[in-house]
Amino acid sequence: MTRKLQIENCKLRIANWARRATLAGFALSALCLFTGCPGEQVVTVVMRPDAGAASTPTAEETEGSTAAAGFGNLIGTVIFEGPPRNLPPLVAKDDPKVKPEDRAVCAAEPIPDESLLVNPDNKGLANVIVFLEKRPANIKPELAKPPSDPILFDQKGCRFLPHIVLLQAGQPLLVVSGDPIPHNTHTDPKRNTGFNQVIKPEDRKGTPIEYKKPEAGPIEVRCDYHPWMKAYHFPLDHPYVALTDKDGKFRIEGLPAGTHAFNVWHERGPGSGRLLERKLQIKIEPDKDTTKDLSYASAKFASVPGSLPRAVAYERLLQGGPIELTQTEEQR
């Protein structure tokens, strides 16, 4: 009898709960009818990646590029408009202005001025850098990692060789020397740690320079012992860069198909950035060579490189070469 009573009480409680729920539902419906129900609430959940996880490049990081399927190449020639200039050597053979203890090495042969090299046959301009302004989101897989083989930056006959070094951030770079006299290699990068060390005579083992971050443009390299010695290093965060050869020709391989913004740099280019062209829009076609020839008037190039000290310009004048100081240089 007690068991039946418990079951009846339980049924009664359930019925009371159901009746109360029904009344509450009617009351809520009536309230909505006369006052209006609140709008639907939307909850947005943002998933944040772990601190060490890789992320997709932002729109700002890939600005200037519109991606498409596939990869292609960019080829072309940079032309100097106007008569080629025959610049006098930076140092003449047996030059008496070189200190006697270095003359047998530094003045054994003329040291050419590499700041403006024009091929007289086709007016092609050497040592022009054509590069993608921004790192693209989809780098060709086999080009994604920097090369592991070290680049040798040599000093021979009191010259830096090569005159311009292109590399990716993290790629090994060794400063070596083939001269029997010491040199000083000095850099002042904006984003990386500066380098200023004496390089021992005939050091073929090499001293490493580390570029852990990309630079916005080429940085100057100089020797404080021999002021005519100058070169450039340009570390980037992508492989899409090329240096024109003696005929002014260049080639950049494995570019993502689509439209990209390119910069064109030359050491005698205008302004502090020395850019002959900025944000040059070029559409890369997939699975083929896209040709883009470039041509620049002689007025684009400074008569004397902006970084050239007045004393060196005067030394050139003494060697018999014509010197036309730009307005910027005259104000120094």
Image (cartoon, helix red, strand yellow):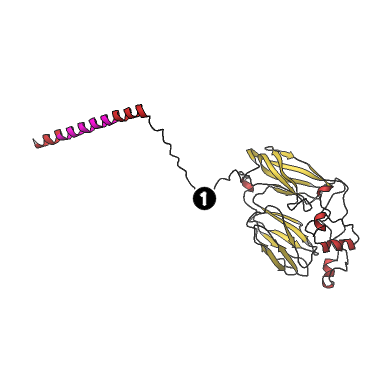
Q: Does residue 331 appear to the left or right of 70 in the view shown?
A: right
Q: Where is residue 94 drawn, in percent x and y?
A: 88, 67
Residue at image location 71% in from the left, 40% down from the top: 282
Most distant residue in the front direction: 35
Q: Is residue 74 above or below residue 271?
A: above
Q: Which SS type dominates the magenta stretch?
A: helix
Residue 10 drawn in magenta: yes
Residue at image location 74% in from the left, 67% down from the top: 184
Residue at image location 11% in from the left, 35% down from the top: 5
Q: Quadrant of the C terminus?
A: bottom right
Q: Where is residue 153 drawn, in percent x and y?
A: 73, 60
- Residue 205 appears in the figure: no
Residue toward you, 24 or 36: 36
Q: Does residue 226 appear to the left or right of 262 in the view shown?
A: right
- Residue 19 appears in the figure: yes
SS under mark 1 = loop
Residue 17 drawn in magenta: yes
Residue at image location 77% in from the left, 57% down from the top: 163
Q: Is residue 22 above or below residue 64?
A: above
Q: Quadrant of the N terminus?
A: top left
Crowding around mark 1 (Cα neighbors within 10 Å: few <14, some 14 to 19, many 20+) is few
Q: Does residue 113 appear to the left or right of 62 in the view shown?
A: right
Q: Is residue 34 above or below residue 111?
A: above
Q: Which range is magenta?
A: 9-24
Q: Where is residue 329 drawn, in percent x and y?
A: 81, 57
In the picture of the structure, the residue carrying the numbered disc 1 is 53
